[in-house]
Amino acid sequence: MSEDLALYDTAHVVYTPRNLTAEELYKGYLWIYKKLYSWRNILRRVPKSRRQIPSYLLFNIFYRKYGRFTEWLCRFLTDERIGKIADRSVISNCLH
């Protein structure tokens, strides 16, 4: 297991399961990622609630298209920075 928390972003293998190599696990991750974020599966999972559809599509299309960008963004936005952003958001919501 890795103790480097920056690697816990779904794009890095942080442990080796009992019956798989780290490479096999990573290849399985890539396979499921491609299946999960295929256009066909994105459209199959569209929520029934009209209010949820825009955010659902935005997230899924963005994540499908910019998976590597989000990996970089996660490295840039450290846990400390994310905490500060979240704190500001909570404080702002409490004041309004």
Image: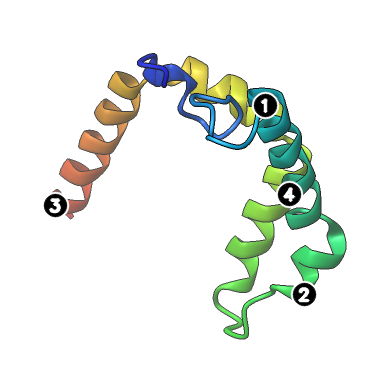
* Residue 16 x %, y %: 54, 27
Q: Nearer the viewer, mark 3 or mark 2?
A: 2
Could you classify mark 3 by the number of other residues whose Cα lies within 10 Å: few (under 14), some (14-19), or many (20 or more)? few
Q: Which residue is mark 2?
A: 44
Please name the amino acid that badge 4 sits on.
Ile
| Disc marking residue 9 | none
Query: How far, Cα to Cα, is label 4 from label 3?
Result: 39 Å
| Mark 3 element type | helix
Dot 4 or dot 3: first in sequence order is 4
Closer-to-camera residue (78/95): 78
* Vertical comparison of 83 with 34: above or below: above
Dot 3 or dot 2: first in sequence order is 2
Please name the amino acid that badge 2 sits on.
Arg
Dot 4 or dot 2: first in sequence order is 4
Q: Residue placed at 72% from the left, 31% from the top?
A: 24
Q: Quadrant of the C terminus?
A: bottom left
Q: Which residue is mark 4?
A: 32
Q: Quadrant of the N terminus?
A: top left
Query: How far, Cα to Cα, is label 3 from label 2?
Result: 37 Å
Closer-to-camera residue (64/89): 64
Please name the amino acid that badge 3 sits on.
Cys
Q: Quadrant of residue 64?
A: top right
Farthest residue, direction front: 19
Dot 1 or dot 2: first in sequence order is 2
Label 3–label 2 contact, CB within 8 A:
no
Query: How far, Cα to Cα, is label 1 from label 3?
Result: 32 Å
Please name the amino acid that badge 1 sits on.
Phe
Q: Which residue is mark 1?
A: 69
| Mark 1 element type | helix
Closer-to-camera residue (30/52): 30
Q: Residue placed at 53% from the left, 35% from the top?
A: 18
Q: Which residue is mark 3?
A: 94
